[in-house]
Image: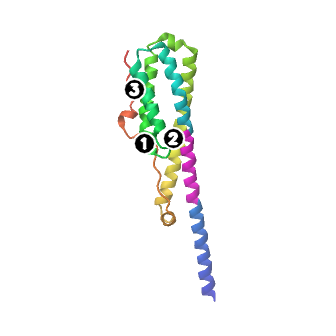
Amino acid sequence: MVFAWTVLTLLIALSVFAIFLYNSLVKKRQMVEEGWSGIDVQLKRRANLIPNLVETVKGYASHEQETLNAVTDKRTAVTALPKDDVAGRARAEGELSQALGRLIAVAEDYPDLKASQNFSDLHASLDEIEHAIQLARRYYNGAVRGLNVAVESFPSNLIANQFNFEKAEYFEIEDEADRAVPKVQF
């Protein structure tokens, strides 16, 4: 009889522990989804700001059409990607960031444009959004790290495998050229 109670107690303890691990994995997966949602919101804010920035620069620097088209094309490519394509979005966003850097560098050549209150406001908004994107990426990548560690670590990996929890992708820039600061020449 004591043996039966011991076995029953052990089974109950293992069940409670398995439930705890499962709930922990669910929480971590939800944090990853929340983090991705935060990145997505900030990227949409930036995408919505870009047409205004391009139009403002176009009014002062209409002969910089190649730079203006590059920004517009990169924005279009970003918005066309599926929301859950983390690697594709990271690559496209890196290219868009470079194009925006070149656009801002072009603006430096036009004192009237730099003095424009509209351009100054848009540039400040872009800086604010870029900072928010950086913070959202850090949060998301931290949540991904937590989930990935839990999915690969023993004993939570047993529960993860049983219930099809998978590792998530980091939001990172893969191409070294995308990490480089745009080269500005005057």
Determine if residue 102 is in view. Answer: no
Question: Image quadrant of residue 173?
Answer: top left
The residue drawn where x is 54% and y is 40% is: 40
Residue segment shown in magenta = 24-40
In the rendered image, is residue 43 in sight? Answer: yes
Query: Any magenta on residue 34?
Result: yes
Q: Position of residue 133 (x, y in %)?
A: 53, 36
Picture layout, residue 57 above or below residue 32? above
To which residue does mark 2 refer? Answer: 137
Q: Amino acid at mark 2?
A: Arg
Is the Cβ of the residue at disc 2 closer than 8 Å to that at disc 3? no
- Can you say whether 148 is above or below 21 in the image? above
Q: Residue at x 49, y 46 (%)?
A: 84
Q: Nearer the viewer, mark 1 or mark 3?
A: 1
Q: CA separation, marks 2 and 1? A: 15 Å
- Look at 55% across and 22% down and name the residue there: 122
Q: Horizontal and vertical percent for residue 99?
A: 42, 27
Of the residues shown, which amino acid type is indicated by label 3? Pro
| Residue 12 position in % (x across, y down) | 62, 75
Q: State the residue position of label 1.
A: 88
| Colouring style | rainbow
Give the class, few, some or many, for how many residues have Cα within 10 Å of label 1's Cα (few <14, many ≥20): some
- Image-quadrant location for residue 71: top left
Residue sitting nearer the eye, 120 or 57: 57
Q: What is the distance, in whole Å, between disc 2 and disc 3 at their CAs?
A: 21 Å
Do callouts 2 and 1 mark residues in contact (Cβ within 8 Å)?
A: no
* Quadrant including the N terminus: bottom right
Q: Earlier in the sequence, mark 1 or mark 3?
A: 1
- Helix, strand or loop under label 3: loop
Callout 2 environment at 10 Å: few (<14), some (14 to 19), or many (20+)? many
